[in-house]
Amino acid sequence: MGFARAVTDRATFGYLADVFVIHDYHGRGLGKWLVSCIREHPDRQKLWRFRDRL
């Protein structure tokens, strides 16, 4: 239904690279949930910088 990907060196930086949701599932909050999972992941909390906005 959806896919999100973060790119990181797992030490100092990371960024949200992709978020895709199949058209039939748009408008159900799946994309927001995927981004929220990445933002709250314990590995992300250890990074100095994480870019998830343009």
Image (tube, helix red, strand yellow):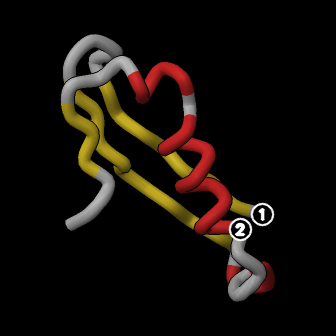
For the N terminus, the quadrant is bottom right
Q: Which residue is mark 2?
A: 30
Q: Residue 47, percent across and down?
A: 29, 23
Q: Is residue 41 above or below residue 25?
A: above
Seen from the viewer's position, the closer of residues 24 and 8 is 8
Instruction: Tell me if mark 2 has few (under 14), some (14-19) or many (20+) residues whose alpha carbon lies within 10 angstroms of its own.
Output: some
- Residue flagged by tag 2: what amino acid is it? Leu
Q: Secondary structure at mark 1?
A: loop
Q: Which picture quadrant has residue 23?
A: bottom right
- In-image side of 54 versus 6 (left or right): left
Q: CA distance from mark 1 to mark 2?
A: 8 Å
Q: Residue 14, percent across and down?
A: 28, 33
Q: Is residue 27 above or below residue 9?
A: below
Seen from the viewer's position, the closer of residues 23 and 51 is 51
Residue drawn at x 47%, y 20% as measured from the top left: 43
Q: Residue 27, percent across and down?
A: 71, 87
Q: Which residue is mark 1?
A: 1
